[in-house]
Image (tube, grey):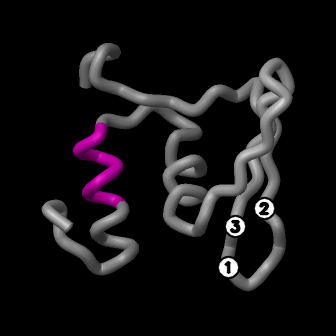
Amino acid sequence: MSAARAFRRNDALPFQKTGGPENELVVVFPAKREVHLLNETAGRIWELLERARSLEALADTLCEEYDGEPDE
C-alpha cells in the first residue's frame, strides 16, 4: 500500500460515541470551532482509520460488516 493511497484519521481530533441507539460519533475540530456528528457508517469509517488504510481496504471491510457489494 503506497502512502499516497492510504488514509488515516487525525489523532489530534477528539471524538466520542454518543451512546445513543443510532451508534453515532461526535468529532470535534477545535481549531475551526466545529463539531461533526457522524452517522453509524461514517463513525465506523472513522474507527477503521485508526490505522492507515486504502480505499479498497475500507470498502472491503464495510462490505463484510454491512453485507454489501463494493459497487453499492
Q: Main secondary structure of the magenta part?
A: helix
Residue 58, above or below 24: above
Tag 3 secondary structure:
loop
Q: Residues within 10 Å of mark 1 (few under 14, many from 20)?
A: few
48 and 13: which is toward the camera: 13
Label 1, secondary structure: give it: loop
Position of residue 15 in the picture relative to residue 66 (left or right): right
Give the residue at x 81% y 53%: 16
Q: Is residue 52 magenta?
A: no
**Crowding at label 2, few (<14), some or many (≥20) Cα neighbours within 10 Å?**
some
Q: Quadrant of residue 19?
A: bottom right
**Residue 61 versus residue 72: which sits nearer the camera?**
72
Where residue 23 sits in the image (x, y, percent)? Answer: 68, 73
Q: Are marks 3 and 2 in contact (CB under 8 Å)?
A: yes
The quarter of the image holding the N terminus is top left
Q: Mark 2 = which residue?
A: 17
Q: At label 2, which amino acid type do we have?
A: Lys
* Span colored in magenta: 55-61
Q: Position of residue 18 (x, y in %)?
A: 82, 66
Q: Residue at x 67, y 79 (%)?
A: 22
Which numbered dot is residue 22? 1
Query: Residue tagged by mark 3?
Result: 24
Badge 3 density bin: few <14, some 14–19, many ≥20, Cα 10 Å: some
Disc 1 marks which amino acid?
Glu
Q: What is the three-letter code of the residue carrying label 3?
A: Glu
Is 41 on the left-hand or right-hand side of 37? left
